[in-house]
Amino acid sequence: MGADNQSWVREFILLGLSSDWDTQVALFILFLVMYLLTVLGNVLIVLLIRLDSRLHTPMYFFLTNLSLVDVSYATSIVPQMLVHFLAGHKGIPYVSCAAQLFFSLGLGGIEFVLLAVMAYDRYVAVCDPLRYSVIMHGGLCARLAVTSWVSGSVNSLIHTAITFQLPMCTNKYIDHISCEILAVVRLACVDTSSSEISVMASSIVLLMTPFCLVLLSYIRIISTILKIQSTEGRKKAFHTCASHLTVVVLCYGMAIFTYIQPNFSPSVLQEKLISLFYAILTPMLNPMIYSLRNKEVKRAWQKLLGQLFGLLSKLAT
């Protein structure tokens, strides 16, 4: 964006979900509770993995990264949205909007790649269990995690730079809950077809490539599980992947529905609701999914709670 155009738009106005005061107060309370549960759940998962030595494995190393991504993603959007529910002026400075787009887009991309990495981890655990510790050594796990963070961040940096080079002229009303990339691109007072195509291409690379890797991993995993003779063995192998598969369906399902739709374009309201689902509900559900469906995590919770109750009993006596 040139210097003249930058002077025209110093801030954007986020239209949000509703202009009715009572509705905004109700939404503020609802999303505040959900955000606090998201932060609490993900922080507790990270602490639990850190404190229980039995969870110091590649799977839970990647789960720690996933929890950090989830709580960071929610924090990049929800606090600003909560402030706007109660504020009369719903403006967001130009620089803050660019920062929000960068972090939300980057963290979303990191999560997609990280889920593909976790699928590979589950593939090795089920299909080559005897060599699991040799293949998934600490060095490889660290490199895979770094690759996830770097790839998502670089993709976001490129798209944020391209988006905020577009001339916005006097357009400043963003009909969305946050500075979402497609909502910002629509403000440009030039033809944005090339920018929208670049967003689509990036979505295909950063979303569909990891998704295909996840799909291939689970095809091999399911094929291996079906070859297991005992029912108990099949159940054990399935439970190894159940939590991750549930999270994959939630995260990739929403993202694919939002950004890769050749024959269907959702309404603005649908885009807002999908973004809310992805920014608030999914990060809140992920810790619950891993806690309720994973026996190792449940045992770790029971051990930690037992220690806490034992400590409280000693203090009481």
Image (spheres, rainbow, N blue to C red):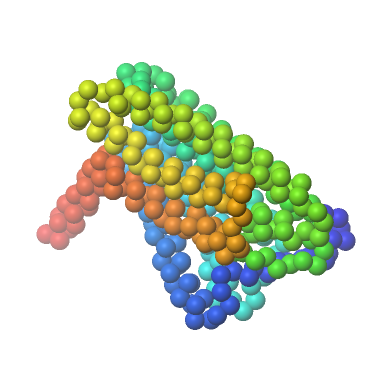
Q: Position of residue 166 (x, y in %)?
A: 79, 54
Instruction: Point out the image quarter for the N terminus.
Output: bottom right
Depth check: 307 or 82 in front? 82
**Residue 274 vertical position relative to residue 25 in the rendered view, above or below:** above
Is residue 251 or residue 82 the one in the foreground? 251
Q: Is residue 135 left or right of residue 84?
A: left
Q: Quadrant of residue 309?
A: bottom left
* Residue at the far left in the pictured view: 317
Measured as percent of width and height from the top left, residue 191 is found at 80, 54
Q: Position of residue 92 (x, y in %)?
A: 67, 66
Tell which residue pokes out farthest to the front in this image: 263
Residue 86 in view, yes or no = yes
User: What is the quadrant of the C terminus in the image?
Assistant: bottom left
274 or 43, which lies in front? 274
Q: Is residue 99 visible?
A: no
**What is the total number of numbered labels drawn onto the structure image?**
0
Q: Residue at x 49, y 81 (%)?
A: 22
Q: Which residue is at 28% across, 48% downward?
A: 292
Q: In the rendered view, does 290 fall on the left or right side of 167?
A: left
22 with respect to 231 (left or right) = right
Q: Position of residue 53 (x, y in %)?
A: 30, 36
Q: Residue at x 67, y 46 (%)?
A: 199
Q: Is residue 167 left or right of residue 97?
A: right
Look at the picture and state if 188 lies above or below 249: below
What's the residue at 57%, 65% (across, down)? Answer: 269
